[in-house]
Structures are given as C-alpha cells and as structure tokens.
Image (cartoon, grey):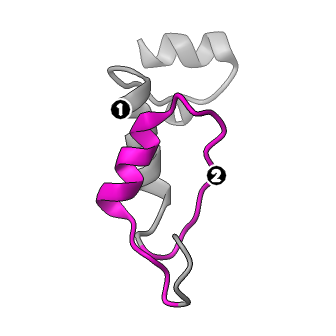
Amino acid sequence: MIENYAQYAGVKPEQVLVSRGADEGIELVIRAFCEPGKDRHSLLSAHLRNVQRQRRNYWRRAPDGSRA
C-alpha cells in the first residue's frame, strides 16, 4: 500500500506516513520532530485539539520561561 501511494504521489516510500487518523499522524510528527522543553510550534487551526493535548502532555516551559 505504501509503495503504491508513494508512486501515485511521486515520492519515495520512506516519505509516506500512514496513520489511523489525523490525530495519530499529528502525534507521530510531534514525537518524531519535537524535543520537549526545546521546540515550539504554532497552532494553525483551532480544531487541532489533539496538538494542544500533546503539547500539555509532552512539552514543558523552556529554560528562559517561555512556553515551549
């Protein structure tokens, strides 16, 4: 399935992320690319409640006191 979709999308199979839904996909991306207490993000849409939940569960304030 991944190979077929990669071919359809014109990308390499290792560039395809398969998840059980948008919430899981968002969580996987945050866990893969964000370091707790270091990285920051911006919410682009209010309906992304899962991003807010992940932020509460995994991110802490940065050493300078700003929200990470």
Q: Which amino acid does label 2 sit on?
A: Ser
Q: How crowded is mark 1: few (under 14 residues within 10 Å), some or many (20 or more)?
A: some
Helix, strand, or loop for circle 1? Answer: helix
Describe residue 44's horizontal placement relative to residue 53 as left or right: right
Q: Which mark is residue 36?
A: none
Q: Residue at x 39, y 30 (%)?
A: 23
First reached walking from the N terminus: tag 2 or tag 1: 1
Give above or below for 4 relative to 54.
above
Of residues 1 and 61, the one nearer the viewer is 61
Residue 60 image position (x, y, % from top left)? 39, 72
Q: Residue at x 61, y 45 (%)?
A: 43
Q: Which residue is drawn at 56% across and 35% down?
A: 15
Q: Residue 24 carries which label?
A: 1
Q: Which amino acid does label 1 sit on?
A: Glu
Q: Residue at x 56, y 78 (%)?
A: 66
Residue 52 among magenta residues: yes
What's the magenta region? Answer: 37-63
Kindly identify which residue carries mark 2.
42
Helix, strand, or loop for circle 2? Answer: loop
